[in-house]
Image: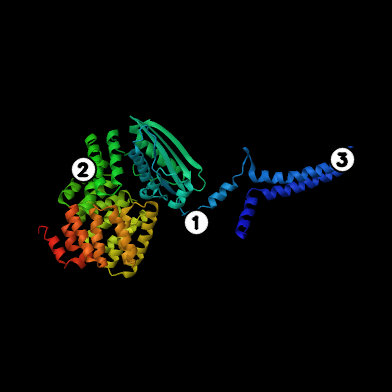
Amino acid sequence: MNQQSMKSFFTQLKKRKVIRVAIAYVVVGWVMMQVGEVTFEALGLPAWALTLLIVVLLLGFPIALVLAWAFEITPEGIRKDSAGQVQQMDEVPPELDRTAPSIAVLPFVDMSERGDQGYFCEGIAEEILNALCKVANLRVASRVTAFRFGGKSADVQEIGRKLKVQTLLEGGVRKSGDRLRITAQLIKTADGYHLWSQQYDRRLEDVFEIQQEIADSIASALSVTLKRKNPGAQQPVDPKAYDLFLRGLSYFAKQNIQDTIYARQMFERALEADPEFGRAWAGLSYTYGIEELYFNAKEVNREEALRTSQKALVLAPDLAESHTAAGIAHCMVKDYAAADTEFLKAIEIDPESYDAWYFFGRSKVHEGELERALHLFERAAQVRPDDYQSVLLQPQIYHSLGDRKHELETARKGIERARAVLELNPDDNRAYNMGAFALLRLGELPVAEEWMQASLKRAPHDSIVQYNAACFYALAGDVEKSLDCLENCYFRIGNLNREWLVHDSDLDNVRGHPRFAELLANFPG
């Protein structure tokens, strides 16, 4: 046994009062033998009685120590000693941030008879997660990393260690018609003990009230304060529309073009059921803005992003998502002053809105205000500490500003975050795609190409992956591979932005090639 183990063992002896019991037992035993020696003869007891007393006292000594280790006497009676539980708390990984409470929300388990309500269960958990993000001094693991553990057999200690959180919220949902049963429990990752649990049997229309009650209960259990501008401002929503809205969120979270289109269809159906549902209008606007930004830069997407975001602003003006969607739409049509106004309003409503900070930063990149963009990306990275995108966009900006030192620093930081996410979610293709650029900047060309090839293999028909690969190979000096990816974008996928071809500095190495000129000739103007 090493010195550290010995120290830990004696600490446990002290905590469990074993040493105190041993001393007390020896003192009391010695007193009993002195009394026996004086009184046994006077009482006429046989000579072997004193010997029996000594034997009993010796046999009782180890028994007393074992009982002292295992049990403690409290005002409520004798119970198992809790000192070992305290030790388990001390064994929380040292990298866990103890300066503030932390929590991960896992997707709730589908307990419906058909098992076809997974989207609804994820939606409920995400809504609670978003409410908890508004809790002061509470660190909340992002959806991307926390939901990776949904339905897995990993124990709470392992999840807590990987996500670096002190508590987990898990639960289950059973939906039948307009009846809803939700169970939720808050668990300490150090020892698996429950801090709080509750079951709710309500009507489907009460789902918002349940979500808020759960968030309030968690805030109370963790002794933190849930801040809300107006607790009573929740817009009444048709239950069918809300169900379709959650379906849309489930698709949208997958971050690829096909699921973005599916999400749009769900939001449109939600609006057919409830045309006044402001959040669905904001979600619909997001799908057009994201398609324009990442997948398909077309006029129709810009027009629809503007139209639907304006509907969201009219119906849900107090929703940060409405203003963020409007900011994205205005950025797409290069109305940067209006975009600024909307992003700033979104941040005023919800200072912890990652989307507001992140897309505000992207808007500033489009506008050419690079230093402002850096500040906004840094703030987005603070709001979501496990996000890699807001970090991996910074090296290129520092490169444009001629700051080689910070270019490399942010590349290293971004790769660290990307690797951490990929460890939890190996299917995060964007982490491979964006991370390849940072690895290239750091001079790790073989690994960088592995990452880029991995992203191409996983998403061969994703236009943004192909376009990013074209930029990557142009920067790496492989002109032919770069042009192959550009032609894939245009001829196989049918999505290539002429403005990107003309103005993206990453493609400078291929502009003089005849294949590039032929490709550019396919665009009018």
User: Is tag 1's residue or tag 2's residue first in the polypeptide sequence?
Assistant: 1
Amino acid type, residue under disc 1 in the picture = Pro
Q: Could you say which disc has been placed on residue 311 in the image?
A: 2
1 or 2: mark nearer the eye: 1
Provide the secondary structure element on which disc 1 rests: loop
Which quadrant, please, contains the C terminus?
bottom left
Count of all numbered marks drawn on residues in the image: 3
Residue at figure coordinates x 34%, y 63% from the top left = 447
Distance of label 3 from label 1 (alpha carbons): 60 Å
Provide the secondary structure element on which disc 2 rests: helix
Instruction: Identify the residue position indicated by label 3 in the image.
Output: 40
Amino acid type, residue under disc 2 in the picture = Lys
Residue at figure coordinates x 53%, y 50% from the top left = 89
Amino acid type, residue under disc 3 in the picture = Phe
Residue at figure coordinates x 31%, y 43% from the top left = 250
Distance of label 2 from label 3 (alpha carbons): 98 Å
Instruction: Identify the residue position indicated by label 1 in the image.
Output: 94
Image quadrant assignment for residue 374: bottom left
2 or 3: mark nearer the eye: 3
Which is nearer the eye, 83 or 227?
83
